Amino acid sequence: MREITALFWDVGGVLLTNGWDRASRHRAAEQFHLDWEDFQDRHELVIADFETGRLTLEEYLERTIFHRPRRFTREEFTAFMWAQSQPIRETLAIVERLARSGRYLLATLNNESLELNEYRIERFGLRNLFALFFSSCFLGVRKPDRAIYQIVLRVTQRTPEECLFIDDRALNLECARQLGMRTIHYQNPQQLQRELRRHGVALELQ
């Protein structure tokens, strides 16, 4: 089996909390007294375009929230959205060790809307850890579409066997494995460390 040379990381649920998942939207509905069913229906209709860069944050908010008068501002709602993002510090510490070693290509592979993705990259210093950002909003395609994994392999010029993909969703991993990539189904930082070692990834600095 070929040695791992590149590690690809999901962001929400692995490195950071999910940025705008169902739980976050539920909290928003409670905080801002939204009609949950209406909000969720509208969100589902536009999320694919939002996460593939075809819909701006302003347009998303207009279609899901501000299609009617509100007692709160776009700025207040956006601030709430941003506040949902928190670091998973133990996982980030593992990535920091790998980045310092210089032994591996580190990149993200995530589904995220443009403005939220850029906020999270900046806010949590991800440019200091990752060389590349394979984000759905940049590529125009989302996991688990086969095309996004093919882009990753072509851009990095890696064979599937030397790539390790870490994600917390089984379907995303299944599609990567179909192309021959190695995978870890992330559960927690301690399990991640064990799985990395099982795949021969060196966590100790030389």
Image: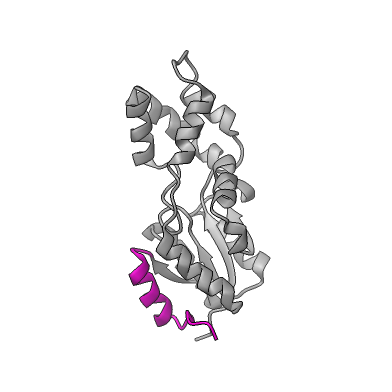
Q: Nearer the viewer, residue 76 or 160?
A: 76
- Is residue 42 a member of the stretch shown in magenta? no
Left or right? Give the position of 28 relative to 81: left
Residue 70 lies in quadrant: top left
- In depth, the one of 136 and 154 nearer the eye is 136
Residue 47, given in percent of the width and then of the height, sits at 49, 37
Q: Position of residue 65 (x, y in %)?
A: 46, 23
Q: Which residue lies furthest to the top in this view?
A: 69
Q: Does 2 sit above or below residue 106?
A: below
Give percent across and percent down for residue 18: 42, 48
| Residue at 67% over, 65% down | 155
Q: Residue at x 51, y 32 (%)?
A: 78
Residue 116 percent location from the top left of the image: 54, 42
Q: Which of 54 and 60 is in front in this view?
A: 60
Q: Is residue 160 visible?
A: no
Q: Residue at x 53, y 50 (%)?
A: 142
Q: Which colour scheme is used?
A: one colour
**Magenta segment: does it hold 192?**
yes
Q: In the image, is residue 79 above or below residue 120?
A: above
All told, the count of numbered labels is: 0
Q: Nearer the viewer, residue 11 or 48?
A: 11
Quadrant location of the C terminus in the rendered image: bottom right
Q: Which residue is drawn at 62% across and 58% down?
A: 127
- 77 up-or-down from 20: above or below: above
Q: Is residue 88 above or below residue 101?
A: above
Q: Is residue 12 visible?
A: yes
Chain part drawn in magenta = 186-206
